[in-house]
Image (cartoon, grey):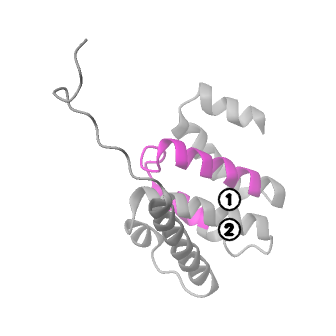
Amino acid sequence: WSALRRAAEVYPASKVFAMLVEVGGSTRNQRAKAEVLGEMAGLISTCGFEQLTPTPSKAVGVMVGLLSERDLLVRNQALECLEGIHACVGQRLWKMLGRMEGKEKELLEARLQKSSTRSKAAEMMSPPEPPARSASMRKST
């Protein structure tokens, strides 16, 4: 998969992301699905979701479909992708998801709740930035 990472450096991220969505939805190999989802999550976190795809509902649909997989790694990677999308677009994610019921919705809600509490805790733990010194406070030499 290092070739995939290099492809994202050479080709536009949107093209690589579209290829990953296609492969992720069609492959039967669980490990390949997990790797593809991991790369998608990386692209989402570095480029932002809105710059990656002109049809967000298709990409989100593939990820939601993979939430129902039996493989734990695939489910976790799909949740990571959806968490990254939520960080980019906020509550619009629910509109992209459409109607979602059952176990998958519960999994996603729990993950997003957990990520929001983690981000709040990280904000509280980070030290406050010192105030910037103004030009009048600096001593001239």
Q: Amino acid at mark 1?
A: Gly
Q: Quadrant of the N terminus?
A: top right
Left or right of residue 91: residue 28: right
Q: Position of residue 12 (x, y in %)?
A: 53, 32
Helix, strand or loop status at disc 2: helix
Instruction: Let me know if residue 113 is in the magenta part.
Output: no
State which mark lies toward you, 1 or 2: 2
Tell me which label, 1 or 2, sits earlier in the chain. 1
User: Which circle marks residue 25 in the picture?
Assistant: 1
Contact flag, marks 1 and 2 (Cβ < 8 Å): yes
- Let me know if residue 101 appears in the view: yes
Residue drawn 48% across the image and 55% down it: 126
Q: Amino acid at mark 2?
A: Leu
Instruction: Let me know if residue 40 is in the magenta part.
Output: yes
Residue that numbered label 2 is attached to: 66
Q: Position of residue 96 (x, y in %)?
A: 43, 67
6 vs 51: above or below? above
